[in-house]
Amino acid sequence: MSESPVAIITGAASGIGRALAVHYAQRGVRSVIGTFSGDPHDPEETLRLVERAGGQAVIQEVDVRNTESVETFADRALNDFGRLDYAVANAGVLRNASLDELTDSRWNDMLDVDLTGVLRTLRAGSTRMDEGGAMVAVSSIAGGVYGWEEHAHYAAAKAGILGLVRSVAVELGPRGIRANVVIPGLIETPQSLDPVNSLGPDGLERAGQDIPWGRVGRPEEVASVIGFLTSADAAYVTGQSLIVDGGLTVKMKA
């Protein structure tokens, strides 16, 4: 059995998750590509890109709303590769709803995926890791830094990830397992390109003009940061939240 590291990645059929699977492949990390049956994006394309990069991966359906599904997903790493080193909780949904439209059902559905789904992923990963394991959860500047009108449920979930991961880092530190958060800014992904629930292409282009770096980010630029946080180069980094936003959140508004 190869001794190269193994990662599980939820939401890996597109966007940041896909970019991370490729990033890992380039660095000799094998992956379990997590995909949701309702996702319109093709996980086979992620697998093709991984293999083109010289990597190794398998595809596993996972519904982060379901504990048994997440446990089976994490077991896939052990069953196929014999180990689990990194867990990345990347799966999420984005839906807009004004406060007066924000029913209990909409609120609960959002948190079940974007916050409790992160808990399920980290919990399943931690029970299968040995010393040296690392976990990363993907938050957002919406909630992680800013508020966002008509997205209170989304922002609450993304803000909750920070407290969750800080506590997990404290609890798992004695076991030699690290946990951190990445907070992406405006990144060009299928989610942010959705003109109904997010900014859409035109909104992203306009927003990019106000970012000090001069453009919105790319999934690969977030993936490389996640790769760093799970690597031995970040061996003394845990419980932290790292913003990847091209300077957006430090720019003073006129």
Image (cartoon, helix red, strand yellow):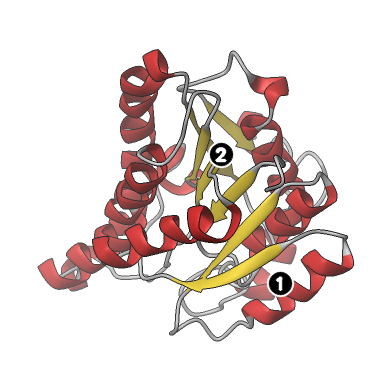
Residue corresponding to mark 1: 46
Q: Nearer the viewer, residue 77 or 182?
A: 77
Residue corresponding to mark 2: 85
Instruction: Tell me if 26 is positioned left or right of 114 in this view.
Output: right
Task: Name which residue lies at 50% across and 20% down.
Answer: 238
The quarter of the picture where the C terminus appears is top right
Q: Nearer the viewer, residue 145 or 226?
A: 226
**On the image, which quarter does residue 168 sit in?**
top left
x, y percent for residue 217: 74, 52
**On the image, which quarter does residue 211 sit in?**
top right
Task: Name which residue lies at 38% across and 43% down.
Answer: 122
The outermost residue toward the left is 104
| Type of amino acid under label 1 | Thr
Instruction: Tell me if 99 is positioned left or right of 63 in this view.
Output: left
x, y percent for residue 26: 84, 50
Q: Residues within 10 Å of mark 1 (few under 14, many from 20)?
A: many
* Sooner in the amino-acid sequence: mark 2 or mark 1: 1
x, y percent for residue 227: 69, 39
Cα distance, mark 2 to mark 1? 20 Å
| Circle 1 SS class | helix
Q: Residues within 10 Å of mark 2 (few under 14, many from 20)?
A: many
Mark 2 vs mark 1: in front: 2
Give the total of numbered labels: 2
Task: Name which residue lies at 63% across and 77% down.
Answer: 43
Q: Nearer the viewer, residue 217 or 133?
A: 133
Task: Name which residue lies at 58% across and 30% down.
Answer: 242
Q: Is residue 237 above or below residue 30?
A: above
